[in-house]
Image: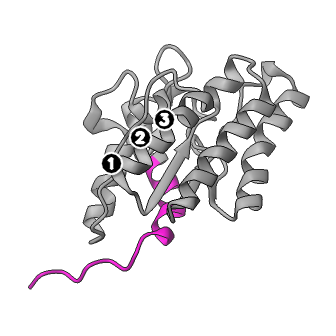
Amino acid sequence: MLGDSLSAGYGIQPQEGWVYLLQQHISAQGYPHQLINASISGETSSGGATRIAKALEKYAPAVVIIALGANDGLRGLSLKAMKQNLAEMIEKSQAKKAQVLLIGMKLPPNYGPAYNHRFESIFSELSQRYQTALTPFLLQGVGENRTLFQKDGLHPTAQAQAIIMNHVAEDLMPLLRTPQSPKL
């Protein structure tokens, strides 16, 4: 799992975050996968592209979840560079035979419709080009409810985490192998 503060659990306890809850969900369903959360608050796609090779080598994952790009957009960084960085992470993951779940993001409306459209379309374009699984918007079901955000207005509360987890799990679970049979 490569992500930013939204995946690192900014402002909440680690066991309250959606990535932790996703691991609990995976285990409860009988899957043997261990979810390694390599998310860093403030991370951009450039940072993820820099770190991906080492993470792939260290963990040899079956699935790579990429939830980066939000900080690129919020900082007004080059969308062309963001797209190249995400493509590089996908290519490196697929070269190591890992399946990829790409998680998209949306920006606040004050960035303007043209910029927002270009930003949002990057995720679907890359998913189509590389045939990856896609969660179009990480905060689906959360983003429209301001009571589910911390005082900063950017980071979801602990109460929002299960909603995020359930949304991502829908797209992740088909990528996992057959669950292990329960032990009798």
The answer to whether residue 104 is visible is no
Q: Nearer the viewer, residue 99 or 55?
A: 55
Q: Nearer the viewer, residue 81 or 22?
A: 81
Residue 15 location (% of width, % of height): 26, 38
Q: Amino acid at mark 3?
A: Arg
- Labels 3 and 2 touching (C-beta < 8 A): no
The quadrant in which residue 45 appears is top right
Q: Nearer the viewer, residue 127 or 21?
A: 127
Task: Give the number of callouts.
Answer: 3
User: Which of the two labelled residues, at mark 3 and mark 1, occupies the earlier sequence position?
Assistant: 1
Left/right placement of residue 118 relative to residue 87 reads right
The label shown at residue 161 is 2
User: Which of the two labelled residues, at mark 3 and mark 2, occupies the earlier sequence position?
Assistant: 3
- Say if 55 sits above or below 114 in the image: below
- Labels 3 and 1 touching (C-beta < 8 A): no
Q: Amino acid at mark 2?
A: Gln
Residue 114 location (% of width, % of height): 91, 30
Provide the residue span drawn in magenta.
165-184
Label 1 to label 2: alpha-carbon separation? 8 Å
Q: Report the residue at 71% width, 25% height from top.
A: 73
Residue 33 location (% of width, % of height): 31, 63
Secondary structure beneath disc 1?
helix
User: Which of the two labelled residues, at mark 1 and mark 2, occupies the earlier sequence position?
Assistant: 1
Q: Which residue is mark 1?
A: 21
Q: Which residue is mark 3?
A: 51
Secondary structure beneath disc 3?
helix
Secondary structure beneath disc 2?
helix
Q: Amino acid at mark 1?
A: Leu
The answer to whether residue 74 is visible is yes
The label shown at residue 37 is none
The colour style of the image is: one colour
